Image: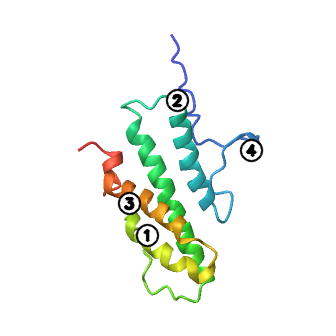
Amino acid sequence: MKKKKASEPVLLTSDSDWHNNACLNYMSDHGTAYTEGYRRAGDIDVSGRVQNFLVYPVLFLYRHHIELLIKQIVGLALVLSEVPDTDQYKKDNHNLNTLWLLAKKLLPEVNDSHRSSNFRLIKEVVKKLHNAHRLVTDLRYAR
């Protein structure tokens, strides 16, 4: 008997039909693809029943979405503001509380129309996510 050829893996292969495929790194600034991707994946998971098996991935997806959004806010605010980036922003920081404090401090520098009542709500969401899982790895790995 002849051996069957192993089929090519379908994941991460290129195709001439580019508009019907997911394209990686196709934009110079693809931060929105990451941010929206984590949120939309969380939405897909939540649209079904969130069972005990899905709670950790769903929380991770939403938490990471929030982290990336805050980092986008900080990055854009630093570009637009007169505030020099004196090593105050470290991209490898995953602490939602400290990231949000920095974003909240920078936002009035670039746009003074944001209401502080919105900041309180955001602070509470960030605080709850941070306190529930202080380490990002808490949502990715079993203890």
Instruction: Identify the residue under disc 4.
Output: 18
Q: Please identify, in this view, whether the residue under mark 1 or under mark 4 is nearer the observer.
A: 1
Disc on the earlier residue, 1 or 4: 4
Instruction: Identify the residue under disc 3.
Output: 127
- Residue 122, how many percent across, how many down? 48, 61
Residue type beneath disc 3: Lys
Q: Please identify, in this view, whether the residue under mark 3 or under mark 4 is nearer the observer.
A: 3
Residue type beneath disc 4: Trp
Residue type beneath disc 1: Leu
Q: How far is mark 3 from mark 4, CA to CA?
A: 41 Å
Given residues 17 and 20, the one toward you in this image is 20
- In the structure shown, which secondary structural element does the residue marked by tag 4 occupy? helix
Instruction: Identify the residue under disc 2.
Output: 48
**Mark 4 Cα shell of 10 Å, populated few (<14), some (14-19), many (≥20):** few
Q: Is residue 81 visible?
A: yes
Q: How far is mark 1 from mark 4, CA to CA?
A: 36 Å
Instruction: Identify the residue under disc 1.
Output: 99
Disc on the earlier residue, 2 or 3: 2
- Residue 14, how many percent across, how many down? 66, 43
Residue type beneath disc 2: Gly
Given residues 98 and 84, the one toward you in this image is 98
Q: How far is mark 1 from mark 2, CA to CA?
A: 31 Å
Disc on the earlier residue, 1 or 2: 2
